Image (cartoon, helix red, strand yellow):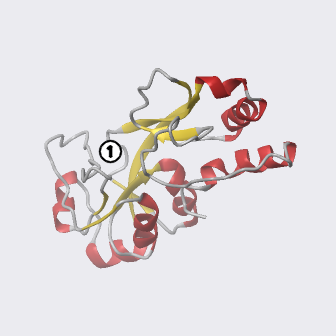
Amino acid sequence: MPPSGPLFTKALTAFAKEYPHVELEIDYSDRLVNIIDEGFDVVVRTGATGDSRLLRRVLGTIEWQLVAAPSYIGQHGLPLIPQDLSDHICLRQKSATGRISPWAMRTAPDFIAPVSLTASVIDPLFQLVIDGTGIGCFPRFMVRDAIAQGSLVPLLDGEIEQAGTLTMLWPAARFRVPKVRSFIDIAAVHVRL
């Protein structure tokens, strides 16, 4: 399972145990789906959620953390200020629109970190950072265990300014369907950022 996948594992497990006869289909993608036209019951999204035909439930705020593997730090050194990132290999996420996800720095708002390697989804970047390829920026929930285990080292702690909201969205008409309402309630209990 991708490193971001465990965020919903407990909710999916709880739902599957409580409703064993409900068929679950998980579409794990960073693609911006059209929830109604493509027939999704529930979508989890960060970022824009503006569609008046949808109901929403905020699950929490996502904070971000710069990290690197100890092997990378041993070879390339520890960045102490944002500008030090200019001398490092920075692994960045690129959206479907071609936009590079920003690394907004609190103490250096005009600094733009270099782009050494990009991926359209965050999970391969996580593995590359674990393997010592470079520095990455990930949601704290993704890196919490790896930091605790010593596989990753937090960098420039508190420097990343951006935060996002994790929101579940579903078509208003489908909220009357018991399986949809139940999944939303279970996810709200089990998802912890």
- The quadrant of the image that shows the C terminus is top right
Instruction: Kindly identify the residue that appears in the image at 84 percent across and 43 percent down.
Output: 19
Callout 1, which amino acid?
Ile
| Residue that label 1 marks | 160
Question: Residue 3 location in percent, x, y?
Answer: 55, 60
Question: Residue 57 location in percent, x, y?
Answer: 58, 27
Residue projecting furthest to the top = 52
Is residue 140 shown above or below 109? Answer: below
Secondary structure under badge 1? loop
| Residue sitting nearer the eye, 82 or 91 | 91
Position of 155 compared to 189: left or right? Answer: left
Position of 17 compared to 46: left or right? Answer: right
Question: Residue 108 location in percent, x, y?
Answer: 18, 43
Instruction: Kindly identify the residue that appears in the image at 72 percent across and 23 percent down.
Output: 176
Is residue 43 shown above or below 117? Answer: above
Instruction: Give the class, few, some or many, for how many residues have Cα within 10 Å of label 1's Cα (few <14, many ≥20).
Output: many
Instruction: Kindly identify the residue that appears in the image at 39 percent across and 33 percent down.
Output: 48
Instruction: Kindly identify the residue that appears in the image at 67 percent across and 52 percent down.
Output: 25
| Residue sitting nearer the eye, 180 or 145 | 180
- The quadrant of the image that shows the N terminus is bottom right
Quadrant of residue 126 within the rendered picture: bottom left
Is residue 70 shown above or below 63? Answer: below
